Amino acid sequence: MDNISVSTTDVRIERHASQLSRQLKLLREKLFPPLSQKTLRTFTSGEAAQMIGVSDGYLRQLSLDGKGPQPDIAINGRRSYTLAQINELRNHMARIKPKDALSYLPQRRPGEKLQTLAVTNFKGGSAKTTTTLYLAQYLALNGYRVLAIDLDPQASLSSMLGVQPEFDLADGDTLYGAIRYDSSRRSLKDIVRKTYFDGLDLVPGNLELMEFEHETPRALGDRQRSGELFFRRVGVAISEVEADYDIVVIDCPPQLGYLTLGAVCAATSLLITVHPQMVDVASMSQFLLMTSDLLSVVRKAGGDLQHDFIKYVVTRHEPFDAPQSQIVALLRNLFGEDVLTATILKSTAIADAGLTKQSLYEIERGQVRRSTYDRALESVNAANGEVLAGIHKAWGRS
């Protein structure tokens, strides 16, 4: 018999995984030279002025007077600012106009609690990660201090924010490092990492998050080992960095496990993503029933389940699709104001930006067809604006 090397399934899959990981690393090096790290584009003076809430002429005069950060000036005289410089200008305006400080620097004030939003649904394809990414970036662009937590072992959010889990993370570099049950537990302060997006920090994810799902049942059977109950551990970890942020956004895994329950218990508000297809709505029905049953057990065990708001976010919406329109109408009829008025459209612009691991906030407007870009961004901004309004209401702001 010939000596034929027979590759078992596990070996073949491991080889495929290694090949794909190496290819993704090469792609990152090609997309983001010379340091193989993502960078954020600069913003025109007009964009910067709009983000800060002043006129373009006012920014120009500040630059001429040598006040605030100095923009990059191109050969044609066009001025551009980094997001870090825009945030410096926000601080500058808040200092020189203290009466209007809140409009320039909207960060939370004493007495306003940290807002933690868990984005969840255990049905894959509901655009949960995309919703989390766009919300976190929108809030950072508007001057808030944001922490994004990737609780999904697939780590798509981490990848979109410039972290490749297989190469960039060591043991304990995810939230698991701060909620694990053994002596290797770390402070979340040591795990949080800055991103290329000023004002937006990240707790990345990778496959080690699954360890929490495996260890929790054993810990529940060993009271001495378990310490803080599993559903409080995410909240306790977040409390270690509470003073550093205004808003935390958590991308939950697509399953109703211990990680998701911990995120829901840590959250002050919930965002449930819905793709308006009947199979997805049927799946969400099961998700809600299971969530209700499990949370009732958690509540009886002492979990705090008071949330400021629960909102359903319609994603990947095709408004001219009659069956989808019927489903959206059904959701509004059933849940009323708990469904965001704005829906996030299904758009080739969002998909095209994602090909280079970017969002619409990151790419130049001319990279995709302008009408498509504007329509998609308008839908995203409208939905994110409603979520921000809910946060302001929870803070007691008008």
Image: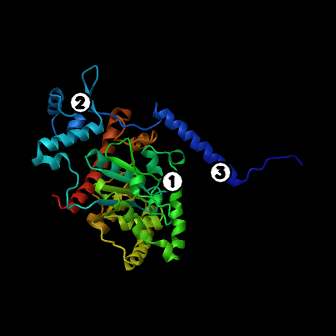
Residue 258 appears in the figure:
yes
Disc 1: CA contacts within 10 A as few (<14), some (14-19) or many (>=20)? many
Judging by the rendered image, the residue that carries numbered circle 1 is 206
Q: CA distance from mark 1 to mark 2?
A: 39 Å
Residue 189, compared with residue 308, is above or below; it is above
Q: Please name the residue shown 36% across and 60% down the image.
A: 238
Quadrant assignment for the C terminus = bottom left
Type of residue at label 1?
Asn
Residue 257 lies, with reference to residue 172, above or below; the image says below
Tell me where residue 156 appears, x and y as whole percent.
47, 50
Q: Residue furthest front?
A: 183
Q: Position of residue 53 (x, y in %)?
A: 17, 41
Q: Residue furthest top?
A: 75
Sequence-wise first label, 3 or 1: 3
Task: From the image, tell me which residue sits under label 2.
Answer: 70
- Kindly identify the amino acid type of the residue bearing the numbered disc 3: Ile
| Inter-mark Cα distance, 3 to 1 | 18 Å
Q: Secondary structure at mark 1?
A: loop
Residue sitting at x 40%, y 55%: 149
Question: SS at mark 3?
Answer: helix
- Please name whichever residue, 282 or 241, is drawn nearer the observer in this view of the structure: 241
